[in-house]
Image (cartoon, grey):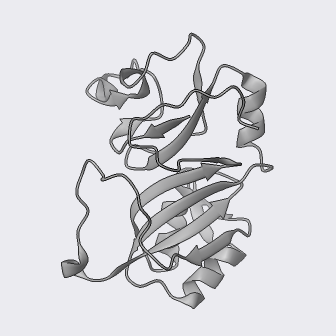
């Protein structure tokens, strides 16, 4: 398990010229040969990323059988109507097509979660209120949570995956790696 920091790509290296100046997971830990990230978090997202050498484990975690929980700091004070829309599923764009997300769990957090300080500062309350929401999905389309919160009128400012199945970041800090024998 790794806490992927903000600004890193969810891969170990790239041959693409435009990505040569990017930060990769391999800079954080000497992962075993054949390691692969299970799922992805975009460059601006943080949090729990599972790393495995087992393709069957990767396929299972990426299936719709496994919950992934995210904490999203959103622009504005999210309301019950927006939460109900998130729970029911919303239309987002996926590869230039309209896609209706499957129903999910979503609720407003009562308090700001205790998370590691982010490498890049986010605007603060002087620029308007923000709130935190928990969204639990068992699907994962490209930038899905960000698209979902934007569609309901509350764009995501910070996104942290806090849990995959029963694996939780708990007190991990950005860049921490915890070796485990099994994810389940």
Q: Quadrant of the N terminus?
A: top right
Q: Quadrant of the C terminus?
A: top right
Farthest residue, direction top: 33
In-front residue for pair 42/80:
80
In-front residue for pair 82/159:
159
Decide if residue 149 is on the left or right side of residue 183: left
Residue at position x 60%, y 66% in the image = 135
Residue at position x 30%, y 30% in the image = 22
Quarter of image, res 14: top left
Residue at position x 41%, y 85% in the image = 77
Decide if residue 6 is on the left or right side of residue 31: left
Decide if residue 146 is on the left or right side of residue 125: right
Picture layout, residue 2 above or below residue 165? above
Picture layout, residue 103 above or below residue 50? below
Farthest residue, direction left: 126
Q: Position of residue 59 (x, y in %)?
A: 75, 34
In-front residue for pair 41/124:
124
Farthest residue, direction front: 171
Quarter of image, res 173: top left
Q: Position of residue 174 (x, y in %)?
A: 38, 42
Q: Position of residue 31 (x, y in %)?
A: 51, 17
Tell me if residue 78 can be seen: yes
Q: Position of residue 131 (x, y in %)?
A: 41, 77
Q: How many marks?
A: 0
Tell me if residue 41 can be seen: no
Picture layout, residue 35 above or below residue 112? above
Residue at position x 75%, y 30% in the image = 57
């Amino acid at each position: 398990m790794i806490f992927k920091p903000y600004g890193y790509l969810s891969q170990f290296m790239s041959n693409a010229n435009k990505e040569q100046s990017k930060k990769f997971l391999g800079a954080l830990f000497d992962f075993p040969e054949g390691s692969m990230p299970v799922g992805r978090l975009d460059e601006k997202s943080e949090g729990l990323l599972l790393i495995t050498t087992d393709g069957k484990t990767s396929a299972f975690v990426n299936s719709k059988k496994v919950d992934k929980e995210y904490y999203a700091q959103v622009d504005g004070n999210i309301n019950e109507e927006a939460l109900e829309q998130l729970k029911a599923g919303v239309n987002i764009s996926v590869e230039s097509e309209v896609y209706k997300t499957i129903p999910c769990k979503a609720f407003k957090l009562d308090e700001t979660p205790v998370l590691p300080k982010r490498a890049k500062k986010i605007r603060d309350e002087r620029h308007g209120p923000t709130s935190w929401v928990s969204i639990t999905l068992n699907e994962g389309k490209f930038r899905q949570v960000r698209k979902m919160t934007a569609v309901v009128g509350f764009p995501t400012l910070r996104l942290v995956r806090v849990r995959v199945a029963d694996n939780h970041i708990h007190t991990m800090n950005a860049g921490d790696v915890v070796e485990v024998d099994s994810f389940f």
